[in-house]
């Protein structure tokens, strides 16, 4: 199976890609004990791509939930990031009439990678047994679940694969 659609998603959807990178760096900062750095990185992710950053905020909260020593730090990072991104949220709320959602032709296609999903299931088993920083891929995979309801194609064959690929590794 080819992951060509993931390559296309990454190259075409640069803001989404940058938000993913910023979110992963925020998770790394939280794990390293750098609350302000994590908040700034997550805030930058919101300024880059609001939808993806929302999923990353879920990943940060899930990571805090599964990693007791990072629980308070994860909550503080999400709150600070929301405060830092609040001017953007206010602007979007004031101009919500100008935003529209439309369906593109890619929504009619479906790409499934059973081997990746099977390896991710095995990775999930080992990640839960080992705990610690091994739960980060689980958090990313869980945080990508909302993508399934809005962009099924990107969830199964594009960006939604990030958590599964990480777990499979």
Image (cartoon, rainbow, N blue to C red):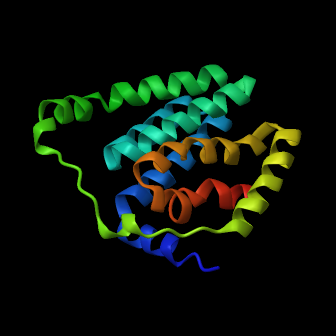
* Lateral position of residue 136 relative to residue 94, left or right: right
Q: Residue 28's image quarter?
A: top right
Residue 169 seen in the figure: no
Q: Residue 68's image quarter?
A: top right
From the viewer's side, name the closer residue of 121 and 80: 121
Q: Where does the image place residue 23, in percent across and percent down from the top left? A: 51, 46
Please tell me which residue is depicted at 59% across the width and 58% down the height of the picture: 162
Q: Residue 14's image quarter?
A: bottom left
Please, is residue 104 above or below residue 3 in the view? above
Residue furthest top in the image: 72
From the viewer's side, name the closer residue of 30 and 2: 2
Please tell me which residue is depicted at 43% across the width and 51% down the height of the picture: 19
Please, is residue 102 above or below residue 31 in the view? below
* Lateral position of residue 110 relative to residue 88, left or right: right
Q: Where does the image place residue 80, in percent across and percent down from the top left? A: 43, 25
Please tell me which residue is depicted at 34% across the width and 43% down the height of the picture: 50
Q: Where does the image place residue 97, in percent across and percent down from the top left? A: 11, 38
Residue 54 seen in the figure: yes
Q: Where does the image place residue 11, in percent across and percent down from the top left? A: 41, 72
Please, is residue 31 above or below residue 137 in the view? above
From the viewer's side, name the closer residue of 68 and 101: 101
* Lateral position of residue 93 relative to residue 38, left or right: left
Please tell me which residue is depicted at 52% across the width and 36% down the height of the picture: 38
Residue furthest front in the image: 108
């Amino acid at each position: 199976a080819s992951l060509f659609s993931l390559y296309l998603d990454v190259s075409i959807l640069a803001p989404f890609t940058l938000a993913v990178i910023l979110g992963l760096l925020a998770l790394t900062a939280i794990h390293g004990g750098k609350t302000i750095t994590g908040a700034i990185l997550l805030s930058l992710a919101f300024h880059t791509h609001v939808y993806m950053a929302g999923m990353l905020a879920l990943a940060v909260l899930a990571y805090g939930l599964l990693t007791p020593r990072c629980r308070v730090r994860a909550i503080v990072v999400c709150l600070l990031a929301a405060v830092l991104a609040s001017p953007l949220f206010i602007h979007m709320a004031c101009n919500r009439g100008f935003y529209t959602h439309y369906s593109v032709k890619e929504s009619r296609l479906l790409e499934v990678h059973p081997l990746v999903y099977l390896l991710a299931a095995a990775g999930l088993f080992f990640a839960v047994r080992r705990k610690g920083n091994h739960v980060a891929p689980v958090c990313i995979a869980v945080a990508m679940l909302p993508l399934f309801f809005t962009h099924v194609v990107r969830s199964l064959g594009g960006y939604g694969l990030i958590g599964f690929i990480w777990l499979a590794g």
